[in-house]
Amino acid sequence: MILQTKRCVLRPWRESDAPALYEYARDPRVGPVAGWPVHTDEENSRQIIREVLSADETYAVVLREDSADRPVGSIGLMFGAASNLPLGEGEAELGYWIGVPFWGQGLIPEASRELMRHGFQELGLHTIWCGYFEGNEKSRRVQEKCGFQPHHVNRDQPWPLMNDVRTEYITCITRAQWEEMCEAENSD
């Protein structure tokens, strides 16, 4: 499936995206704050595409204006065991990241809103969860801009991918809250 926003195309990842993925995922400012290690080389990125990013409802974020169709980030909805949260039926977790050169442009909130629309309207979800680690202000702001509400805090959580312990702030939005937010935005 391909989803589109004003500035982005959300499309499935391809193994041929490994060079572009490595370009952004090797930057230590991107992965560690989101809970995953920096990529070590293009083959590592290719393996991540095969094992992680090829999951259903996980998309490469591509700028519409880029004729080379190169991913600059990733966004996805995770279900069941793919999430570290105890998700029920009709629930998913939203996850995302974007390369440093694209920070501060509002691309991930834009892509998140489209994936939320897709989740609620087309997948029939009733709740979308999200989270950010303590200190990740950029991710906190994305969630705030997209209408996610604070739900709870998981303190001192072992995080095996990074071999450390973290505090994670969990947020969520229900379909009713999302619909109310959309109505308010459309009435402006």
Image (cartoon, grey):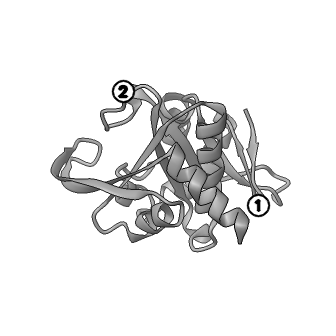
Q: Which quadrant: the N terminus?
A: top right
Residue furthest left in the image: 156
Q: Earlier in the sequence, mark 1 or mark 2?
A: 1
| Residue linked to disc 2 | 81
- Name the side, left or right, on which 143 lies relative to 36: right
Q: Residue drawn at (37%, 28%), measured in percent from left and top?
A: 88
Q: Which mark is residue 7?
A: 1
Q: Nearer the viewer, residue 100 or 3?
A: 3
- Name the side, left or right, on which 153 lies relative to 143: left
Residue 17 position, x and y percent, is: 66, 42
The amino acid type found where label 2 is placed reads: Ala
The amino acid type found where label 1 is placed reads: Arg
- Give the quarter of the image for residue 76: top right
- Name the side, left or right, on which 75 lies relative to 121: left
Does any portion of residue 171 appear in the rendered image? Answer: yes
C-beta proximity under 8 Å, tags 1 and 2: no
Q: Residue drawn at (52%, 66%), measured in percent from left and top?
A: 145
- Give the quarter of the image for residue 3: top right
Tell me: residue 121, above or below residue 135: above
Q: Nearer the viewer, residue 154 or 178?
A: 178
Q: Nearer the viewer, residue 134 or 20?
A: 134
Tell me: residue 25, above or below residue 121: below
Tell me the crowding category of disc 1: few under 14, some 14 to 19, or many 20 or more residues within 10 angstroms, Cα based. some
User: Tag 2's secondary structure?
Assistant: helix
Residue 33 position, x and y percent, is: 36, 60
- Give the quarter of the image for residue 155: bottom left
User: Tag 1's secondary structure?
Assistant: loop
Does any portion of residue 73 appear in the rendered image? Answer: no
